[in-house]
Amino acid sequence: MHPAPEILRAGYAELVCTDLERSRWFYVDVLGLIVTEENDEAIYLKGFDEFLHHSLILRRGPVAALAKLAFRVCSPDDVDKAELYFRELGSDVRRLPAGTTRGIGDAVFVHDPLGYPVEYFFDAEHTERMHQQYHRMPSNRLTRLDHFNITVPDVPEGQKYYSDLGFRLSESIEDDEHVYAAWYFRKPTTHDLALTSGDGPRLHHIAFSAAEREQILNTADILGAYESEHLIERGPGRHGVTNAFYLYLRDPDGHRIELYTSDYYTGDPDSPVIRWDVSNPRRRSWWGHDIRASWYEESSLVLDLDGNVVPTRHQVASERAAAIGADGFGIPAGPE
Ligand SMILES: [Fe+2]
């Protein structure tokens, strides 16, 4: 078996948006992301700490969906390794010459065994890192892309796949019969990629980091000022898993975006794995409101390498069903 490419971190995502002007309002005016380039068909965005060309692409299209997840690998050689690795797995693999995606060098684009369109790249155009451009920063500034969370029908299947790719487990939600969710990392934080049980392959969310939770709360205020507070789906709150402070939003197409801060360092080789029982009500929210059904049940469609919607499979085990009682679902409204 060819060795797996050495992956550095979650690199960027590409979302298909049905109304690009409306999406620009959400990602630029509400979230405060920086536009590095744009044209009639696409907008390229990044956070204030980032120096690569983009960490998010919004592309105009007829069906709202995930068009691509991209991982940055550790060297140009790892792009070649990715091609050999995925060809041996029997995946649909395409070599993308430099510039096929604006700002991205030589890359390999794969329809991976879990059904996702994933690109592996190293070379990328640099842009100015704006971390000290305080006079240009909005009150809700975001620093960088943090992670992807994907909805998969069979979490253990996803765990084997990402373990084989060299990702390390930080935390999980499980019981004696099933694993309902798992968090995997390459960079030394709690995750670059999380697996959530649900009908899939689908995208659950993309998360951007803020330096402080005040910046996340300012986004909530800004949504209120635009009379768009209905786009807040969950939070603010504190996660049990990862210990991060969070706010979940839905963009105008329903793509879910998490604003995220203050998880912990995992870079030591013996960093302990934390396993949460699904019956523990503090696993998803250390504190915070009950989780809406939409958060468990809705996620974005996924496209193949030709832009066709990938069919989904029904989930093996539902965390929401397993957590009835723990999360407040299914409990009578009050005493008789
Ligand atoms: Fe997340």
Image (cartoon, rainbow, N blue to C red):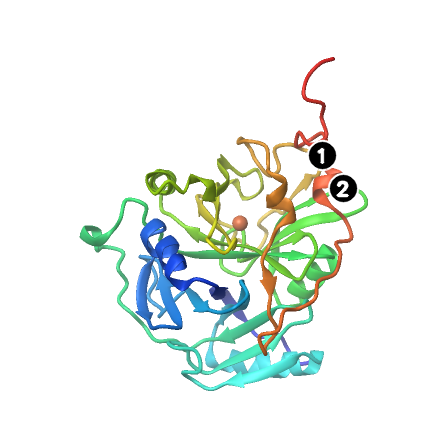
Which residue appears at 36% of the width and 63% of the height? 45
Pick the residue in front: 322 or 9: 322
Query: Under tag 2, what secondary structure?
Result: loop
Mark 2 packing: few (<14 Cα in 10 Å), some, or many (20+)?
A: some
Mark number displayed over residue 175: 2
Can residue 244 be seen?
A: no
Q: Is residue 19 left or right of residue 218?
A: right
Q: Residue furthest left?
A: 135
Q: CA distance from mark 2 to mark 1?
A: 8 Å
Quadrant containing the C terminus is top right
Which residue appears at 33% of the width and 56% of the height? 28
Q: Which residue is mark 1?
A: 279
Pick the residue in front: 19 or 147: 19
Res 49 → quadrant: bottom left
Identify residue type, mark 2. Answer: Asp
Quadrant containing the N terminus is bottom right
How far across and how far down the image is residue 134, in percent? 21, 51
